[in-house]
Amino acid sequence: MAMLITENCISCGSCEPECPNQAISQGDMTYVIDPEKCTECVGAFDTPKCVEVCPTEGSIIPNPDIQESREQLQAKYEKLHAN
C-alpha cells in the first residue's frame, strides 16, 4: 500500500528529499504522494522515511484505498530502479 499525506500536512517539505523513489511532490495545498511510485520504502529502508522525518504526527498514513503486499512493493521498487 502506498503512503498518503493528510490535510494535517504543514507543507514543510521535509519528506520530499527523503523519498528514494521521488514519489513526493508539492501539491496545491500540501505535499502529495504518487501511489505508482510509493513503495513505503520497501527495497530501500526498513520503514517509510517520510513518516520518520515528518514533524507532524498523523500527517502521513498508509493509504487505505491501495492494498499491496511486501512482495508487490519490492517488485515495484525494483521496476522503478531497474536502470
Image (tube, grey):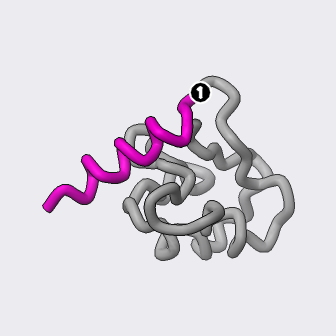
Which residue is situated farthest in the left direction here?
83
Looking at the image, which is closer to me, 10 or 3?
A: 3
Q: Residue furthest front?
A: 71
Q: Is residue 39 magenta?
A: no
Image height of 39 relative to 36, above or below: below
Residue at point 54% right, 42% down? 70
| Location of residue 46 (image quadrant) | bottom right
Q: Quadrant of residue 14?
A: bottom right
Residue at 73% of width from left, 64% of height from top? 10
Tell me the SS state at disc 1: loop
Q: Position of residue 35 (x, y in %)?
A: 47, 39
Residue 47 vs residue 14, the one in the foreground? 47
Q: Quadrant of the N terminus?
A: top right
Q: Pinpoint residue 64: horizontal percent, then vertical percent.
A: 69, 28
- Identity of the residue drawn at 83% across and 53% down: 58
Magenta run includes residue 69: yes
Q: Residue furthest right?
A: 57
Residue assigned mark 1? 67
Mark 1 is on which residue type?
Gln
Q: How many marks?
A: 1
Q: Nearer the viewer, residue 36 or 71?
A: 71
**Percent position of residue 32, x then y:** 54, 49
- Range drawn in magenta: 67-83
Predominant secondary structure, magenta span: helix
- Identify whether 23 is placed above or below 46: above
Looking at the image, residue 50 lies above or below residue 23: below
How busy is the neighbourhood of tag 1: few (under 14 within 10 Å), some, or many (20 plus)?
few
Residue 41 percent across, percent down from the top left: 52, 59
